Image (cartoon, grey):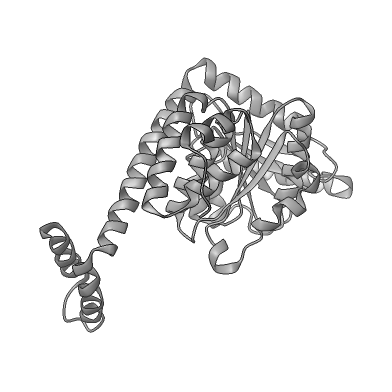
Amino acid sequence: MASVPSISQLAEGIQSADRASIGRAITLIESYRPDHRALSQELLTQLLPFAGKAHRVGITGVPGVGKSTFIENLGTKLVEDDHKVAVLAVDPSSSRTGGSILGDKTRMATLANHPAAFIRPSPTSGELGGVNRMTRETMLICEAAGFDVVLVETVGVGQSETVVADMVDFFLVLMLHGAGDELQGIKKGILELADMVAINKADGENAQKAAVAAKEYEMALHLMAPTSDLWTAPVVTCAGLTGEGISELWAKIMNHKNIFSEAGATTLRREEQRVRWMWAMLDDRLVDALRSHERVRELLPVLEAQVRSEQTTPVAAVDHLISTFLES
């Protein structure tokens, strides 16, 4: 990795919204080198007093729902209203499949070229722990740089939604009408996390179909426990391509922000998120330490073979590995 300015210089550059400094800082926190990790934590400690002022919105949706078009239209509206918008795209599978997140700047060309916007994919090495650490820390850097809205887009499906929902103030789920099994399987799990459901592509001849789908989702949400006693998740329709319904959707997000801020719920939610983040990182670090332990590495293939051939049980193998790790 190329040499970087001092941590104090880097922090000053970030606070003055210097894009080169922001890029260097994110590259630093994405590094797995122990010395870079230490430097990144020193940097984040200096930036913490200047972070935390942005409104954090997570956005997910079924494949083909039009997330990028929606985010570009929403982000463009926000920068035109004098907001500074950062878009962080998360895809835990990108390292295995190549993903599509590196194309976000192409797919969001208008927004990416706006001086008040910043778009960054989050490489995660295929690990949800990477989502947790890198995306959260990139978010703090963007906030310290003065971005007052952070949009976190989940590109992967499955557990990444849970991870992202636990690092934002508001979780928006985009859906399509006529997708078939709207209320089943993985989508039900996503709905349980939602602070709002938006039926996208509700323009032209699709408007009526989207309205019907919205009613179906409203009924489904009534059967689920709300994410908070302060808020019942609304269902809206919108069209990311034309911008229809985007202003109304953002107004509801701002209403949620005001309600939660006045009740002190946003502060409490972030405090709980930080503690869960600490425990998640502790789990990751302990697993890393275990796997990198020399004697454990020697034992692993032996114990795996014994478990496969039923010479020992998985529990006994785990106990052996942990005792070996702790005794060293």
* Residue 77, image x, y percentages: 78, 33
Q: Residue furthest right?
A: 204
- Could you tell me if residue 232 is visible in this image? no
The image quarter in which residue 214 lies: top right
* Residue 267 against residue 64 in the figure, above or below: above
Quadrant (top left, top right, bottom left, bottom right) of the C terminus = bottom left
Closest to the observer, 161 or 213: 161
* Residue 102, image x, y percentages: 66, 57
Q: Residue furthest bottom?
A: 309
* Residue 177 against residue 277 in the figure, above or below: below
How many discs mark residues in the rendered view? Answer: 0
Closest to the observer, 139 or 37: 37
Closest to the observer, 122 or 189: 122
Side (left or right) of 182 relative to 160: right
* Residue 18, image x, y percentages: 64, 34
In percent of the image, x 44 and y 29: which residue is there? 46
* Residue 11, image x, y percentages: 52, 32
In percent of the image, x 68 and y 34: which residue is there? 85
* Residue 91 against residue 221 in the figure, above or below: below
Side (left or right) of 192 relative to 102: left
The image quarter in which residue 316 lies: bottom left
- Could you tell me if residue 138 is visible in this image? yes
